[in-house]
Amino acid sequence: MRRPCGAGAGGRALAALGAFAALTTLAGCHVDMWRQPKLIAQHESAFFKDGSASRLPVRNTIARGQLRDDEGFYTGAVGGNLLEAPPIPVTRAAIERGQQQYKIHCAPCHGSVGYGNGMIAQRGLAMRRQPANYHTDRLRAMPIGHFYDVMTHGAGVMFSAAARVTPRDRWNIAMYIRVLQLSQYAELRDVPADERAALGIGEQDIGPEKNDRNQEKRP
């Protein structure tokens, strides 16, 4: 049986084209594709005079997204004076977020209510001093910026939480600390009048003096 005219030439052309494609692919798989000259953090490098591949940020430059022009928001103070009020809106969502973050980052040492008796303080860590009790007169009188500052820079045996907690969440936590303080020192006089009436509480049920039931540290 005779082959169709030109069949052999076409087969040879396809074979040549396939061989060319294979050679091109192999040529592209050169070791330089994965052995590239590059800088690896914490490694040596002969490119720089100090021999280190890790570089400090260029002086007087700010990375994109890192412009911190709101002094109060990012430091907890303005002109060296701690903020008395948070620089973000006080909302239910913000406080609930603060509660969530407090349970993660603060409660293990400071306790779920803030008396400085968390499980790490009780069992897991020998400390030079007990974690802060938020319900002392000193800390109840502290500006809210104090708590943000401590979370940012650390204090005593507490490390800075800045690497783990964003600035906004630090404010959310600070607001939740205020909620904890109020929860332990609130009085009937602090309940709105309409809600007291709904509970059947009259003015005669409100004592004239501030309660002192929390003056001593709870267990």
Image (tube, helix red, strand yellow):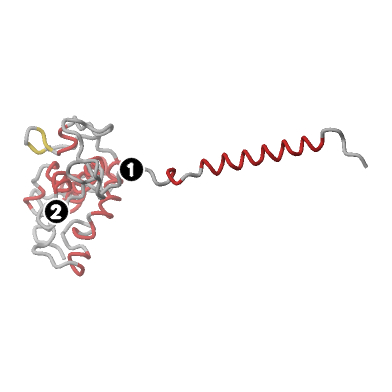
User: Is residue 6 or residue 127 the one in the foreground?
Assistant: 6
Residue 195, x across and y down, in percent: 26, 43
Residue 206, x across and y down, in percent: 15, 49
Residue 20 appears left or right of 8: left
Q: Which residue is mark 1?
A: 38
Vertical comparison of 60 with 160: above or below: above
User: Is residue 46 or residue 204 the one in the foreground?
Assistant: 46
Q: Which residue is mark 2?
A: 134
Q: Amino acid at mark 1?
A: Lys
Residue 18 appears left or right of 130: right
Residue at 74 percent of width and 38 percent of height: 12
Q: Quadrant of the C terminus?
A: bottom left
Quick one: label 2, few (<14), some, or many (20+) residues within 10 Å?
Answer: many
Q: How far apart are the alpha carbons under marks 2 and 1? A: 50 Å
Residue at 19 percent of width and 40 percent of height: 56
Q: Quadrant of the N terminus?
A: top right
Q: Are marks 2 and 1 in contact (CB under 8 Å)?
A: no
Instruction: Identify the secondary structure beneath mark 1.
Output: loop
